[in-house]
Structures are given as C-alpha cells and as structure tokens.
C-alpha cells in the first residue's frame, strides 16, 4: 500500500521507510567517505571525523549552501526540517550531489507538544526513534559541560562565603567576589520542566552550597549549544568556552568560566560532540 501523508501518521511513514533505509556504511560510501573517517554508532547512525575529511579535501572547492531559517509551520506541521529534507529529495531527484545538515531534536519538544522535529510526511529523517531519543549523546554532553560550570560557580560562591582570603589562598583560590544577584547562568535539563524554572538552592548547611535563587532552562538554550554550532575546531571551541560569562562580581566585573578554571574540563565533555552525526 503506498504511503499517503494525508492519511498516515508521521511515525507510520517512518516505520515503513526504515525497512528499506541504507546502513551508515552505505551512506558513507555514497558520500565518498573513507573507512577511517566514519565512526559508526550501530548500523544506521554514525559520526564523521570532520577533521580528517577537511584535511583530505582541503584543495576541493566548497559546495553551494542553502540556509533554511526560521519559518512559520503549516497547520500540519511542515516547517524547517520538512522543507530541508524536501529540498534534499528534490535536488537529489534532479541529479545533484546533495546532503542536508539539520539540528537534533530537543527532548522537551519531543516529549511535549511539538513532536520529534524530524520532518514530516514523506520528507523525514530516519531512523526516527534514535534521532528523537538522544542520538549519539551530543545534547547530553552539552548538559554535562554546562552544569559543570554551574557546579564550579556555586561551589566557588560557597567557599567565598565560608572562608576568608587566607583560607581561600590555601586552596589556591583567589576571591572573585561574585554578586549573588547577578548570576547569568541557570542549570539545564533537556525537558520542559516548568516547576524548576525558578527555584531556591543551597537550603541546607554551610557545606551544601550558597543559598540563592536559581532555576533550570532547557538544554539547547545553553550558550554551549551556540558555541557547538559555530566552533570551527577544538581549539576554537576551547577559546570560546573560556569566555562564557557566568556571573558578575560586586564591582561589575564579568566572571567567566576561565576565572572558575573549569573551561578546559567543559571542553573535554564536548570533544566527541564536535563530530557531526550521519544518518
């Protein structure tokens, strides 16, 4: 029976299409990737060692680039992803060598009202379930890197509240004099958790943090997500990671992740996420 997007649900179309999808090895071969440039995550999803690819193709001309940006979806849900995948299919039908780059679905919209953000109808990204539920762990890496900065920030505020400058110096710490009313960071979670948007933390004893207002935002709103989107290599990412402003001092001076000496550890969480996914 032919698949009809006016009659079949997106998941039904995806499920049927997955019976005939190419393996990640076939995709890599069709794209001209070499064996050591493909990093498989099972049979149908993988990562690409982009540095090896760019090095091998450094003398090749760049392709043409089409940007599908913010648009209002139709009542049936066709928006950026559906348009992008549809363009890929149309250009491929016309004999063009084409590939699409789309962002991963966020767990919040997937589990709330928006759906998987994998496209729709006959213009979808498959396999649908792995794509919608974490894929290769990039968003999880963003959460760990971001929340590590929050741990470093709140721990530093705790120490500066509990100890004088002499005791801080014994711990190789210099007072940053962080203003608790000018904290720029929140925690992040990959769900739409309304009850956690505005909370109070550090309610127990002196060793359990600094009591202050805080909250959770959704994972992909993190500045680290933006850095991942624009970083050209690991060195660039490392430099950008150290410039993140997490708070301000009482004199109005920015307090960065570099001041907290956590930017290197945050970057370590993000190393694998730099490699794009292939599916």
Image (cartoon, grey):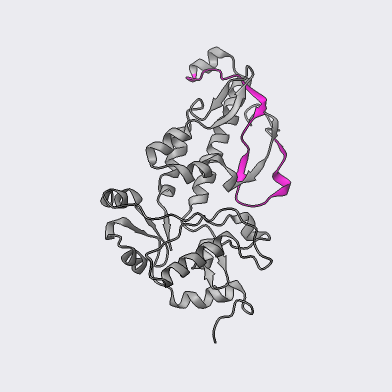
Where is residue 133? Give x, y as percent.
54, 60
Q: Residue at x 26, y 49 (%)?
A: 59
Residue lying farthest bottom? 1
Residue 39 as seen in the image, left or right of residue 9: left
Would you place residue 151 above or below residue 109 in this image? above
Q: Residue 278: image x %, image y %? A: 41, 60
Side (left or right) of 74 relative to 236:
right
Q: Position of residue 49 (x, y in %)?
A: 34, 52
Residue 22: x and y in percent read 40, 72
Quarter the N terminus occupies: bottom right
Assess whether residue 197 is covered by the magenta stretch. Answer: yes
Of residues 265 and 124, the one nearer the viewer is: 124
Q: Quadrant of residue 98?
A: bottom left
Query: Which residues are the magenta region?
Result: 171-200
**As drawn, 25 above or below 261:** below
Taking the spot 45% from the left edge, 36% from the top edge, the residue there is 265
Residue most extreme to the top: 166
Q: Look at the image and say whether residue 23 sits in the magenta stretch.
A: no
**Above/below status of 211 relative to 80:** above
On screen, residue 1 above or below 256: below
């Amino acid at each position: 029976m032919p698949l009809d997007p006016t009659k079949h649900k997106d998941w039904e179309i995806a499920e049927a299409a997955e019976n005939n999808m190419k393996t990640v090895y076939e995709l890599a071969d069709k794209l001209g990737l070499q064996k050591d440039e493909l990093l498989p995550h099972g049979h149908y999803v993988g990562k690409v060692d982009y540095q090896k690819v760019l090095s091998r193709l450094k003398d090749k001309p760049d392709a043409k680039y089409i940007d599908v940006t913010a648009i209002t979806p139709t009542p049936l849900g066709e928006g950026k992803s559906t348009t992008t995948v549809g363009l890929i299919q149309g250009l491929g039908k016309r004999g063009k060598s084409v590939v699409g780059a789309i962002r991963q679905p966020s767990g919040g919209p997937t589990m709330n009202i928006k759906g998987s953000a994998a496209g729709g109808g006959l213009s979808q990204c498959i396999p649908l379930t792995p794509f919608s539920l974490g894929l290769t762990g990039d968003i999880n890496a963003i959460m760990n890197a971001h929340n590590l900065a929050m741990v470093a920030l709140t721990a530093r505020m705790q120490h500066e509240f509990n100890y004088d400058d002499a005791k801080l110096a014994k711990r190789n710490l210099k007072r940053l004099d962080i203003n608790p009313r000018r904290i720029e960071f929140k925690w992040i979670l990959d769900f739409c958790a309304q009850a956690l948007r505005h909370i109070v933390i550090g309610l127990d004893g002196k060793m359990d943090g600094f009591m202050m207002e805080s909250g959770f935002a959704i994972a992909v709103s993190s500045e680290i997500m933006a850095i991942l989107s624009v970083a050209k290599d690991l060195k660039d990412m490392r430099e950008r990671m150290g410039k993140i402003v997490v708070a301000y001092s009482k004199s109005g001076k920015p307090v960065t992740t570099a001041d907290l000496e956590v930017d290197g550890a945050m970057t370590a969480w993000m190393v694998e996420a730099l490699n794009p996914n292939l599916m």
